[in-house]
Image: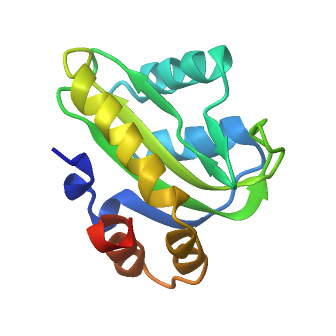
Amino acid sequence: MSYLKFLKEKDIYLDLKAKDRNDAIYQIVRRLKFKNKDKIFKAVMEREDLRTIAIGEGVALPHARTKLVKEIVIKFAMLEKGIDFSAPDKEPVRYIFLIIAPYRNTPGYLATIARMVKVISNPKNKEALYNIKTEKDALSILKNDKNI
């Protein structure tokens, strides 16, 4: 199952202004509709501190598993200006997929991460995202299976 089908326009943030990695992740987590945002942020940052989740070419996939959510949550943000995420290619990150998953859904969690990497690794998708104007445009690109 592709969990990207659950991604909605309300889950997309264009022109996120952040001063650094922590601030970018914090701003996305603050927009979640959960009570325990601080604990979710802490879980994501603990995972990030183990090993960067920047995959290169301007993309980062901060993620965590926690008992604080019952279903996989996906958010997508584009940074107004790229920021350092300690990416392997040293490129600044402009595209962030935040993934929060329950402990019990390991296959869905891993499949979601793999799917996002596949979508965002396509040069056509990255170029199209760079030129979007609305959340609806971004959603169309991210969910279009023909773009993989």
Above or below: residue 60 compared with residue 52:
below
Q: Is residue 33 visible?
A: no
Residue 76 occupies which quadrant of the picture? bottom left
Asked if residue 36 lies left or right of residue 45, the reply is left
Quarter of the figure with the C terminus = bottom left
| Position of 130 relative to 90 (above/below) | below
Q: Position of residue 125 (x, y in %)?
A: 49, 71
Compared across the picture, whether 80 is left or right of 130 comes to right
Q: Position of residue 127 (x, y in %)?
A: 59, 77
Residue 13 place in picture, x, y as percent:
48, 63
The structure residue drawn at horizontal position 20% and vertical position 57%, both measured from the top left corner, is 5
Residue at 30% in and 40% down: 73
How is the model colour-coded?
Answer: rainbow
Specify whether 90 is left or right of 118. right
Quarter holding the N terminus is top left
Up the image or down, 45 lies above or below 71; here it is above
Q: Residue at x 62, y 51 (%)?
A: 59
Residue 26 seen in the figure: yes
